[in-house]
Image (cartoon, rainbow, N blue to C red):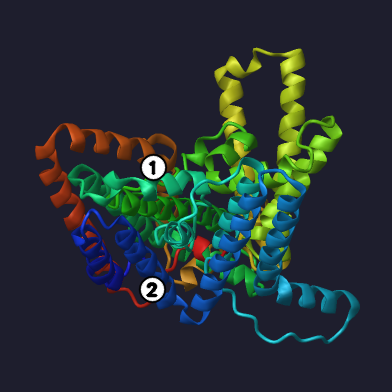
Amino acid sequence: MLFTSAAFAFLYLPIVALVFYLLPRRHRTLAAGWLFAASVFFYGYWMPEFVALLLGSIVWNYSVGRRIATRGARTPAAKRWLIVGVTVNLLLLGYFKYANFFVDSVNALVGAGWHLGEVLLPIGISFFTFTQIAFLADGYQKGVREFAFTHYGLFVTYFPHLVAGPVLHHAQMMPQFRDAANYRFNTGNFIGGLAIFALGLFKKVVLADGISPYADTVFNAAEAGAQPDLAEAWIGALAYTFQLYFDFSGYSDMAIGLSWMFNIRLPYNFNSPYRALSISDFWRRWHMSLSAFLRDYLYIPLGGSQKGPSRRYINLFITMLLGGLWHGAAWTFVVWGGLHGLYLAINHAFRATVAKHAPRLSEHLAYRLSAWAITLLAVIIGWVFFRAESFGAAGRILSGMTSLAIPPDGPHVLLWNAGLDTMRGWTWCLILGALAFLCPNSNRIGEALLARTRARPRFCATLGGTGLSLAVLLVFINETRSAASAFIYFNF
């Protein structure tokens, strides 16, 4: 079930919210159980065949977490259970997400003909697996106090984050599910959440889906063997750069807005990443919960920066390589992750050199503009591999981005054949770039709206009417399209 669908907006969400707030306040466990069951239904509506897998994963990790807790933080017995729990999670993820990739890679390498059969990828498996690995690791390192099974199940399946993040921590969510105040209807939170949900819906339905034909046309043509010209290659790369930005930003806004409607605060997962002045800054702003997970549970355990510069760069490269593989079972994702590992190593080495020899260089405007432009260019090159389905397609896009030659069929023929106007493509990129680079981000907008709804009750009526009208209009627009457009991160 998509957040952008009429079934979600006009049936699922109103029913879930109405029942949640009509349940007696003294029965918080019942209300949490309702939200847990509704979240499982949300998942099952999309992939009913994997509901048992999701629930089995929850029961397994809950049981292992209890065993870790009863044996005490950082004890040998707890460590053994941690290893067992994490191993089972990784084997589960490995089978469903990487088994076919591994077999196909071996076949290509040695010329074998092994066939595993089609293994369907359960939606959201990367997110609910990483969330529970973090739970086990936190239980071993810090201990866990809250063990209500209903709250734990809700923590894992909570529908705003279940299929595309953010990656949550037990300590972030369980106290909120335990707080009696969060089970009372709060007008300010509900209206503020509705407004941010509508903003995210606008980003997805209008902005991301609006520019997606340009990205799809160029990348699909490159995959089929066509060579984009200079303008087409750059429009395709920039279109995907902004499509992904507003698609993921829109989902993050909708997840946060939906949670505010239930008095729950999810951690921010997106913070204007295209304004970053370095690749390190980019990863502090893009998919912030995943970045933190990779840092805390992979980079630091590998040794982080504690064993000298060379080992630090190796650890960064390994972390990002695995981060790329997490995004998808394809060598293009591995190369994308490796590129970012290389970017990070170069960035840290450069910063160390500047700090030693020119510590005040970063204060100059020219330096900051250059840093921003180089960072954005590196990110765009990375997105080409992220979007391309093969190295051949990525190579043709990158070749087009650096070539001034006109293809034999004439300029812009790929866009022309798809009924797309080149100038309109550039205009789209310019508008979306201005929104991404210059406008206040939705985190700041949301916090300002929440403050006003709490301080000025009359403002709630205006904001609520505007948000509801916009959301209804956008859902109707989305329903008139020939096919539903899923969020890009649903595939990971």
Residue type beneath disc 1: Leu
Image side of residue 219 versus residue 42, left or right? right
At x 27%, y 51%, the residue is 183
What residue did someone put label 2 on?
41
Residue 250, x across and y down, in percent: 39, 53
At x 51%, y 49%, the residue is 170
Residue 85, x across and y down, in percent: 68, 61
Image side of residue 255 versus residue 191, left or right? right
Q: Marks 2 and 1: in contact by CB < 8 Å? A: no
Residue type beneath disc 2: Phe
The vertical placement of 236 against 256, above or below, is: below
Image side of residue 7 versus residue 462, left or right? right
Residue 381, x across and y down, in percent: 64, 50
Quarter of image, res 283 = top right
Q: Nearer the viewer, residue 154 or 180?
A: 180
Please identify, in this view, whether the residue under mark 1 or under mark 2 is nearer the observer: 2
At x 47%, y 68%, the residue is 416
Label 1 sits on a secondary structure element that is: helix
What residue did someone put label 1 on?
435
The vertical placement of 482 against 346, above or below, is: below
Q: CA distance from mark 1 to mark 2?
A: 36 Å
Quarter of image, res 208 = bottom left
Tell me the quadrant of the picture where the N terminus can be found.
bottom left
Label 2 sits on a secondary structure element that is: helix
